[in-house]
Every structure is written in C-alpha cells, then in structure tokens.
Image: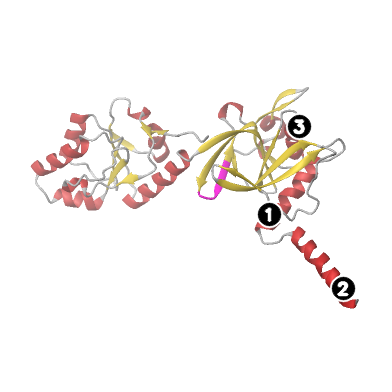
Amino acid sequence: MASVSSVKLGTLIDEFQLEVLRGAEGYRDVAISSEDINRPGLQLTGFFDYFDANRIQVIGLVESTYLDGISAEERQIRFDTLFREQIPAFIVARGIEPFPECMEMAEKYDRTVLRCHDTTSAIISAIVTSLHNHLAPRITRHGVLVEVYGEGVLLLGDSGVGKSETAIELVKRGHRLIADDAVEIRRVNTGSLVGMAPELIRHYIELRGIGVVDVRRLFGMSAVKEESEINLVINLEPWREDAVYDRLGVEELYMEILEVKVPTITVPVKPGRNLASIIEVAAMNNRHKKMGYNSALEFTKQIESHFDKAMGKQ
C-alpha cells in the first residue's frame, strides 16, 4: 500500500534559498502535503470560495500592483482575511518588498512570510516540480535495484535466491547498484517509477558468508547511483523441472506497481547458469523493445515466412 508523504517547509526553504522575512513558531517543521501552489489573486479581492488553505501562497507583480492601488485600510482587511486561514507559507516573488499590512497581519496570526528574487511563474513551476517529487506516491519492496546498460532492473525473489550475489557480479562488470534488500519506489508521473535505497542502507549490500559490504568504498563512486527509473522487473525463482518456462519471449508480461505497468520476466535459477549475463541480455533486449525492435516477434515472422514458402512450393 502506498504511503502518504509530506515534506517539511524547511526543506523547501533550503532547496530554493528562500529569504525568511518572518518565521512562525516551528515553521521549518511545518508539513507540506499539497502538491499545488496558489496565487491568491481572487482571495485578495475577498473571494474565498473553494480556497485550499493547505497550499503555499505566492504573490508577484500582478498582485502587488493591485494591492498598491487600494488604501492601506483595505489592504489590512485583505491580509487579515487571508492570514486568518492556516496557510503553511506566504511567498513574495521578484524580490518585492512586502506591504507593512502584510507583515502586521503575519505577526498577528503567526504566519510565515518568505521572499525570493525569481519571477512568479518560475518559482511556482520549480516548487510544484519539487513537490511532485517529494510527495509522489511511494512503496517499499524487498528486492535489489541495479542499473544495467542504462536500464533500471528490479530483481525480485525469495530470500536466498541469489539477488545480492547477482548484483555484486553486475557491479564487477561495470554496472551500478542503486539499492539492496529494500527498494523505495515512487511514482513520479502517470507512467514512470523511480527507485532508490533507504538512506540508512544506501550503497551497502549484504552477502551471505561475508556480511555487509560498502559498495561505494570497495568499488568506487562509479559503482553506485542514488536513484534510477525502473524499466524492467526480473523475478528470480529456483528452477523447477515441472515448470513451463517461456522459450520464445513472444508473450509480454507486466507487473503493476503503484498503478504503473512495468515489463516483467521470470528467470529460473539453477547451478551453472550465469545470472549476470542473462540479466545483461534481458536489459539490452528490453531497451530494444522500447525502441521498436522485438527479436522474438522477428523470429516468429521468419518461422511463419519459412513455412509459408514451404507450403507454397508444395
């Protein structure tokens, strides 16, 4: 089940280097849970229908010009009405000096007022993008995530099937480790998933018989990566003699994670099979499929063409 995320206001302040003109009590720990930003143009005229107080409020040149054209008493009323709402933060863009009535009402209701020098549209776009990233639906899966030839490959399977050992072999071949044991997956948009490791175990891998290994220090910075898009899921399972495995690869199978369908294949594990080589080929083959070339379908077409010609000669 996907978890509900939030991001602290202090994180956004540091990320965008926002100037704190007035900080409410505990403002850095205020949890932002809405991905949207609001320009309170209508609210500054007194219209509050459908107003969402959970959103960060941003004003720019248009709003400031409007406020400059009304009396100080009227401005005080407008800011009083706005700051009476439990807004998480009020940002003034373009480096504009906030009106005295703004600061007065912020003091009265203990609201946070921030400022930046970016244009209004630029700061709103940047913050919305950041919020989509921070607040994306996420889930944690037991598995290993590696990047192979630019493809993010999520290895799943029962404990002890050989996921970590395969990952370390792939690292030795020049590929990169993203996460071992626990993979935090988030949906960054309607069609893509990004995986990363929990901070506590990032860059570490557990090998039975050896223990925990720091991959970054042992193999260098080029052997690890902070996060990667998940392009392919590979299920590793012990080889069963009675099981029927796909020999051609014509059938396209998918796994749904956070309502996103990801191509998936099952690779049986058996002594003597080089799993690292198989996964390398699987990653390259998946990339070819995304580029429009499916070798299994091409092979099937050649077989059908061969039989058509043979039947024609008869």
| Residue 287, disc | 1
Which residue occupies 73% across, 53% down? 285
What's drawn in magenta, residue-wise?
190-194
Kindly state the secondary structure of the residue where label 2 is placed: helix
Amino acid on which the number 1 mark rests in the picture: Arg
Q: Which residue is mark 3?
A: 161
Q: Are marks 2 and 3 in contact (CB under 8 Å)?
A: no
Residue 197 coordinates in the image, percent (x, y)? 59, 33
Amino acid on which the number 3 mark rests in the picture: Val
Q: Nearer the viewer, mark 3 or mark 1?
A: 3
| Residue 21, disc | none
Q: Which residue is mark 2?
A: 311
Q: Residues within 10 Å of mark 1 (few under 14, many from 20)?
A: some
The answer to whether 275 appears left or right of 8 in the picture is right
Residue 36 coordinates in the image, percent (x, y)? 36, 44
Of the pair 220 and 4, the residue shown nearer to us: 4
Question: Gap between marks 2 and 3, in whole Å?
Answer: 47 Å
